[in-house]
Amino acid sequence: ADRPPCIARIGLTKYTTLDGYRIDEKYVPAIKANTSYSMLQPVTTATSICPSDYGYYYLTIKADYHRDIDELSGYNNVGYDISPQIHYHHPPYVDLLLKSIGIYEWDVDNLELSWAMDFKNIGNVDIDSAFPINFYLSTDTAIETTDHLVYEYLSSGLEACSDDRDLSSITSLVHIPPGEYYLGGIVDVNNDADEDDEGNNIKYFGEIITVPEPPRPDLYVRDVSVIN
């Protein structure tokens, strides 16, 4: 039967039994039954490969990657170019990334904030020394060290291409002036790590936290009377 259009996935893999890293997707037009289709197109750079996962790769193509076609069998949809292999490598570098900040609960009565953060070394070199991650409340999304410091986290180091996280931070905000704030963080705030890119070290949570006015006494005159 004639085949409708589909998407072919182009990737790199170290092992011919796996799909490997996706580097591009290409549109393949409809073709008639018992005919073939040749594709000669440039593909993008393999930026999805973790820098520490260097080595030799095979080029692979998987037809109908999104399974748009009702096929008799999909097991023969993957092809590999066994030779030559592609040598992927990257110069040694360190790059810390503050991936995410999430707020679980804001206890406005007790002024306690429960939150979590996730950070990663996306470089291909281990970080063996400790580095701090500081968290602030800021009146805008431009998180700076001059904002209100609410939490200090010290990482002991981080291996190449690996994640770490703190999932149980409960922070008291009793010292924060009333107002509306964003929670944000700065990884490697003192620039202890010699990083390839310092531009991805800052992250903030998109929802506003409102710190209310503290309770205050309010005296009033209840009654006035003349005794004599």
Image: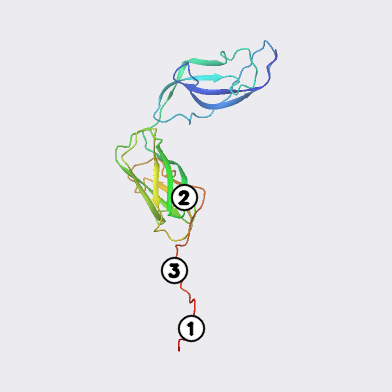
What amino acid is found at the position of numbered circle 3 in the picture? Pro
Is the residue marked by circle 1 packed among few (<14), some (14-19), or many (20+) residues within 10 Å?
A: few
User: Residue 112's x, y, as percent?
Assistant: 42, 51
Q: Which residue is mark 2?
A: 106
Is there a contact, CB below 8 Å, between mark 1 and mark 3? Answer: no
Question: What secondary structure is found at the residue carrying circle 2?
Answer: strand
Q: CA distance from mark 2 to mark 3?
A: 25 Å
User: Residue 73's x, y, as percent?
Assistant: 60, 12
User: Residue 48's x, y, as percent?
Assistant: 48, 30
Instruction: Name the residue: 48% across, 83% down.
Output: 225
Which is nearer the eye, 219 or 159?
219
Is the residue marked by circle 2 packed among few (<14), some (14-19), or many (20+) residues within 10 Å?
A: some
What amino acid is found at the position of numbered circle 2 in the picture? Trp
Q: CA distance from mark 1 to mark 3?
A: 24 Å
Disc with the residue nearer the chain's start (1 vs 3): 3
Q: Which residue is mark 1?
A: 225
Quadrant including the N terminus: top right
Instruction: Name the residue: 65% across, 17% down.
Output: 70
Q: Is residue 228 above or below residue 27?
A: below
Is there a contact, CB below 8 Å, between mark 2 and mark 1? Answer: no
Residue lying furthest top: 34
Q: Is residue 130 above or below residue 139?
A: above
Find residue 158 and name its label: none
Direction from residue 219 to residue 38 in the image, left or right: right
Q: Which residue is mark 3?
A: 217
Is there a contact, CB below 8 Å, between mark 2 and mark 3? Answer: no
Q: Is residue 160 above or below residue 166?
A: above
